[in-house]
């Protein structure tokens, strides 16, 4: 029973546990979108100060709402990370529903922890449930971060502060390692949830796209018991989080300043289990405990992501190979394979879109970093749809030739600008007619981008061609500098949404050998 100011029973729908249960029973069982929307609104209402709920009643209701939401959350995650691409409308709708839920859940758990610490009425009654409260709070922060990373969006700085508060309290009360059944079939602890979050964000943020980032988080959650959270640096910590001045997790550096508020995540104990998991995935099998929310992914893709994770958890952390220098120049940018063709000198500019201009802020021997305003990126310009792995063409002012590059990092700053880290493939591309004799008629002719790489004496040709075009069993032919070459396929280097990047061995032919 919840009483008002004058002893009258509150008529708020959430004031009576039995009524809350009736509300949950009436939720649509087969419409997770509507159910999750209603649950998020009830969580928001639960935080309204004017309702006068005692802390223990607020916690009891929050537990019911949170538990009831889990099946619907899994269903929406299932649809959001489906292997098939969503329409923009579908993607926005699912993202918004998940973001609203995790935001309200995280704020509710954080507020309740604050009420307990302040000794609010009824707060003492939730003492035994504090490990659940803190673990679910950290899990809700992970959900919010996953959604921000999926869109390369700016993370609310308050999230890092809340994360520090949850963990410091759990550590201070000595229940950070207490095993709990957070949800059905989810055995964890506050320290494990914290370690998974730090390891995942440290390895994925800014350099991984939506689906690979999700799969990486699921892999680390599966391996989470092997992650160790340490208060001292012993050379084994790969990532570090500062509880005193909470900011995004970073790679641990041996010569950095060390103080008692730093917490290090050690990953060495997950290396062997991860290698064993990769061997299982190579057989086309995924362990039952590896939870992808019911989605079935191609095991080859999951295996590739697991291999990438294994490479990323090495000590010492990777160092920058080439020094960067500050520079302030503008580049013309063509986003994607087809726009690069449109901007070429091959005579294909049939209604070609204008190139965009990006500001370069620093540069190295192998790449550069640009800054693009949010408004430009969202206004249908060349930055629209930009993601990790996007192919771009670049051309400096007063230079006639275009180069080719691939986006490797994306980060949104507090001003809403997008910072774009780019790896240069070649400073000059040549649009190249190619011949595939295994095809018939007009299908035997295709157009590719030949990457003219300076000082390359390997005898190889790097080509950008249409997606799904590369085959390890098909040769191509091309003419370069008045010479004819047979191109023997060596390897597919990378496959993007709109391109294949492949290596070929160049074998010079007599002019007569290349005739039809």
Image (cartoon, rainbow, N blue to C red):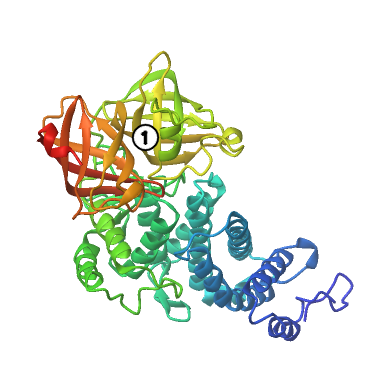
Q: Is residue 199 left or right of residue 158?
A: left
Q: Residue at x 52, y 51 (%)?
A: 148
Q: Is residue 433 above or below residue 271?
A: above
* Camera-nearest residue between 126 and 187: 187
Q: Nearer the viewer, residue 437 or 101?
A: 437
In depth, the one of 35 and 105 nearer the eye is 35
Using the rendered image of the protein, determine whether residue 258 is visible from the camera's viewpoint. Answer: no
Left or right of 20? Residue 4 is right
Does residue 56 appear to the left or right of 320 in the view shown?
A: right
Location of residue 133 in the rendering, given as x and y in whole percent from the top left corner: 54, 69
For residue 166, above or below residue 396: below
Question: Tag 1: Cα neighbours inside 10 Å, few (<14), some, or many (≥20)?
Answer: many
Residue 145, given in percent of the width and then of the height, sits at 50, 54
What residue does disc 1 label?
A: 422
Residue at the (46%, 73%) spot, across then down: 293
Q: Secondary structure at mark 1?
A: strand
Can residue 442 be seen in this snapshot?
A: yes
Q: Position of residue 481 (x, y in %)?
A: 20, 24
Q: Quadrant of the C terminus?
A: top left
> Which residue appears at 37% of the width and 20% of the height?
326
Give the position of the N terminus as an image quadrant: bottom right
Q: Is residue 2 left or right of residue 465?
A: right
Q: In terms of image quadrants, where is residue 291?
A: bottom left
Residue projecting furthest to the top: 398
The spot of residue 185 in percent (x, y) is 43, 81
In the image, is residue 234 above or below residue 406?
Answer: below
Say which quarter of the image contains residue 327: top left
């Amino acid at each position: 029973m919840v009483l008002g100011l004058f002893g009258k029973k509150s008529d708020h729908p959430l004031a009576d546990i039995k009524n809350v249960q009736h509300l949950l029973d009436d939720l649509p069982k087969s419409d997770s979108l509507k159910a999750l929307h209603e649950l998020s609104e009830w969580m928001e209402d639960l935080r309204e100060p004017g309702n006068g709920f005692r802390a223990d009643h607020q916690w009891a209701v929050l537990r019911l709402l949170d538990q009831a939401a889990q099946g619907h959350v899994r269903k929406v995650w299932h649809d959001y990370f489906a292997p098939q691409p969503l329409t923009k409308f579908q993607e926005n709708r699912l993202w918004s529903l998940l973001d609203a839920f995790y935001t309200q859940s995280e704020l509710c758990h954080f507020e309740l922890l604050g009420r307990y610490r302040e000794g609010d009425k009824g707060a003492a009654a939730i003492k035994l449930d504090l490990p659940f409260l803190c673990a679910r709070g950290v899990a809700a922060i992970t959900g919010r971060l996953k959604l921000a990373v999926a869109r390369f969006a700016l993370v609310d700085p308050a999230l890092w502060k809340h994360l520090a508060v949850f963990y410091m309290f759990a550590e201070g009360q000595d229940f950070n390692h207490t095993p709990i059944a957070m949800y059905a079939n989810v055995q964890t602890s506050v320290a494990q949830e914290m370690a998974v979050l730090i390891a995942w964000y440290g390895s994925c943020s800014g350099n991984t796209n939506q689906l690979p980032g999700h799969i990486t988080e699921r892999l680390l959650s599966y391996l989470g018991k092997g992650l160790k959270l340490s208060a001292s640096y012993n050379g084994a910590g790969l990532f570090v989080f500062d509880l005193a001045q909470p900011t995004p997790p970073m790679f641990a550096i041996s010569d950095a300043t060390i103080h008692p508020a730093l917490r290090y995540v050690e990953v060495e104990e997950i290396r062997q289990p991860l290698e064993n998991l990769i061997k299982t995935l190579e057989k086309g099998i995924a362990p039952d405990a590896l939870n992808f929310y019911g989605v079935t992914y191609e095991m080859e893709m999951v295996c590739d992501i697991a291999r990438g994770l294994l490479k990323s958890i090495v000590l010492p952390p990777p160092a920058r190979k080439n020094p960067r220098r500050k520079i302030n120049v503008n580049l013309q940018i063509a986003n994607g394979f087809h726009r690069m063709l449109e901007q070429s000198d091959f005579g294909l500019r049939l209604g070609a879109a204008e190139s965009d201009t990006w500001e370069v802020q620093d540069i190295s021997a192998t790449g550069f970093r640009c800054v693009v305003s949010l408004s430009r990126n969202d206004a249908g310009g060349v930055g629209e749809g930009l993601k990790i792995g996007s192919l771009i063409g670049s051309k400096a002012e007063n230079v006639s030739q275009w180069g080719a590059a691939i986006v490797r990092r994306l980060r949104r700053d507090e001003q809403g600008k997008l910072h774009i880290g780019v790896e240069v493939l070649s400073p000059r591309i040549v649009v190249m007619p190619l011949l595939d004799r295994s095809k018939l008629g007009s299908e035997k002719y295709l157009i590719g981008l030949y990457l003219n790489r300076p000082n390359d004496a390997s005898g190889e040709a790097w080509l950008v061609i249409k997606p799904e075009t590369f085959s390890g069993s098909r040769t191509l032919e091309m003419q370069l500098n008045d010479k004819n070459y047979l191109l023997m396929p060596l390897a597919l280097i990378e496959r993007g949404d709109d391109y294949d990047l492949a290596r070929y061995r160049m074998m010079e032919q007599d002019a007569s050998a290349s005739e039809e």
